[in-house]
Amino acid sequence: RQLVLATHNPHKVEEFQAIVAATRPDLEVVGYDGPEPVEDGVTFAENALIKARAASLHTGLPALADDSGICVDALGGAPGAFSAYWAGHAKDAAANTALLLDQLSDIRDPHRTAQFVSTIALVAPDGPEHVVEGRWQGRLALAPAGADGFGYDPVFVPDGQEPGAERTVGEWTAEEKNAASHRARAFRALVPLLAEL
Ligand code: ITT
């Protein structure tokens, strides 16, 4: 069974392929290079639905879309749905993370808490629409570390690590991240709904 992944972010494609292969190996995740809709929603769910609807309409296949970001408690949940463009119009991960660390420069632990959020929309042609969410709790590092992953991974330190040996997601392997991430959690919530396909 084919499932279109409505994203133009190659890192998300890689992560979804690994997560789906571990959970539903019978599904074939195919990329999407059709027209990119305007993401003018203000919530993760709105944007995920906009992307999944456009891809399902264009391909005639069931489509998944992920809208995601980092929500920082000290900033009232920002950048949230604006994570990709936090430092301006270019999706510049280094500039985004630098700005975020700068905005938190006066904030010390235990007040640097944040969550990675992944909201996945599933839209099948003429079928019902579903939206699920996964959250990953952690805090912001004082400086970036590690070069793996993408986006805010080098500044996000997930909870639950051995004290003294904590690493940012930029220092985690892809396997470690894909077993624990917000995206993996959201996909787990989606699995029962995929049975309808
Ligand atoms: P598509 O809309 O084409 O899927 P995108 O990267 O623009 O690609 P979003 O609009 O959902 O996707 O923006 C998500 C941003 O949130 C992303 O660019 C990163 O900055 C951040 N983000 C999301 N998931 C992340 C993760 O697993 N690790 C690090 N940063 C993440």
Image: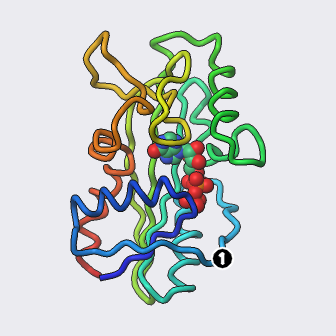
Residue ID at (29%, 82%):
1
Q: Is residue 43 visible?
A: no
Residue ID at (53%, 74%):
32
Residue ID at (55%, 41%):
151
The image's colour scheme reads rainbow
Outermost residue, right side? 89
Q: Which amino acid type corresponds to the residue marked 1 in the rendered image?
A: Pro
The spot of residue 38 in percent (x, y) is 70, 67
Position of 155 with respect to 34 (left or right) is left
Q: Nearer the viewer, residue 24 or 146?
A: 146
Looking at the image, is 192 positioned above or below residue 73?
below
The spot of residue 190 in percent (x, y) is 31, 63
Position of 132 with respect to 39 (left or right) is left
Tag count: 1
Quadrant where the C terminus sits is bottom left
Q: Mark 1 packing: few (<14 Cα in 10 Å), some, or many (20+)?
A: few
* Residue identified by numbered label 1: 35
Q: Is residue 76 visible?
A: yes
Q: Nearer the viewer, residue 83 or 94?
A: 94
Q: Quadrant of residue 123?
A: bottom left
The spot of residue 146 in percent (x, y) is 47, 28
Element under disc 1: loop
The spot of residue 166 in percent (x, y) is 34, 18
**Does any atom of ligand 1 lie closer than 8 Å to the CB of label 1?**
no
Residue ID at (66%, 26%):
98
Looking at the image, is 24 positioned above or below residue 183?
below
Q: Nearer the viewer, residue 36 or 132?
A: 36
